[in-house]
Amino acid sequence: MTTAEKPDAALVAYARGLADELGCRFVDRRRETLAGLARKYPDAAGGILVASPQGLRFAADGAEPLFYHPSMAQIRVKRLLEGAGDALVEATGVRPGDAVVDCTAGLGADALVLSFAAGAGGSVTAIEASRILYVVVREGMKAYRSGMPELDEAMRRVNVIHGQHLEALRGMANRSADIVYFDPMFARPVPGSASLRPLRAYAEDRSLAAEAIAEAKRVARRAVVLKDHRTSGEFERHGFRRVRTSYSAVDYGVIGIQ
């Protein structure tokens, strides 16, 4: 853990606090380059988390830098504000006031759209297994300013938590959420999804377990929803009914709760 060059006292204190939380070494940046720090400290081989006035950035050798940005979620929310539709909102049936659990948060784009759709009276809990992704997205959603008040308000309402979704679901009460949502890392990258390239280097890549689906069905009041590649066999394997298919590489499936 380090800072950008020429940090003020507040930024240093913030970085030190994150280092303590994560159990990693804090190093004063001084005038060192990140490559220089990596050479100097062998335990930096796994990557360096950099705190700056612009937010957190994680840099690891051989991977694209990871940082928080709402990306396509910003465009999607803008379209919703203009009265257009959104495939995820339509597939999940999310309504104002809903409680939603996003089991595979990633960079938080879908959680952000769901938070906007659920409104101030709703809630979105976004679970992320990767510790680096979790902290980058958690801190980014606390501080990022898009210039769109509605988007920023939705961002602040997302509760990002770290953990495996199966364990998290096990700890939730029966019928405690309206919608439980899964968006596992696609085995086959979707052409044109350049914003997701850094994610593939850091996200935990695991197929959905039948037990996770069973727990989701216990927790959900209305629906369990899966987003996956249209060629995926996960829909049939877990009993999802495809509710949206198109020319897109992405399909949505739903298990309705009675």
Image (cartoon, rainbow, N blue to C red):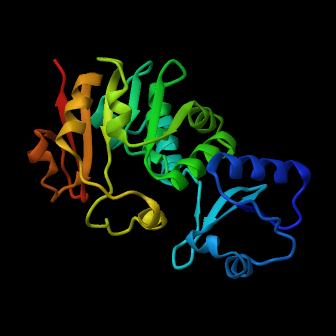
Which residue is at 38% across, 33% downward? 168
- Tell me what residue is drawn at x 30 percent, y 33 percent: 92
As displayed, is residue 178 above or below residue 239? above
Q: Residue 210 location, x and y as percent?
A: 17, 41
177 on left or right of 16: left
In this image, 112 relative to 20: left or right?
left
Q: Is residue 186 above or below residue 147?
A: below
Compared to residue 40, the image places residue 180 above or below, namely above
**Residue nearer the viewer, 47 or 251:** 47
Where the C terminus falls, by quadrant?
top left
Residue for point 53% across, 33% down: 159
Q: Residue at x 46, y 62 (%)?
A: 202
Give the camera-side residue of 43 and 198: 43
Instruction: Report whether 238 appears left or right of 11.
Output: left
- The picture places residue 94, in percent across and down from the top left corner, at 36, 28
Image position of 223 (left or right of 236) = right
* Total residue callouts: 0
Q: Position of residue 63 (x, y in %)?
A: 51, 74
Q: Quadrant of residue 178?
A: top left
From the image, which quarter does the N terminus lie in? bottom right
Where residue 49 appears, as percent x and y from the top left, is 66, 62
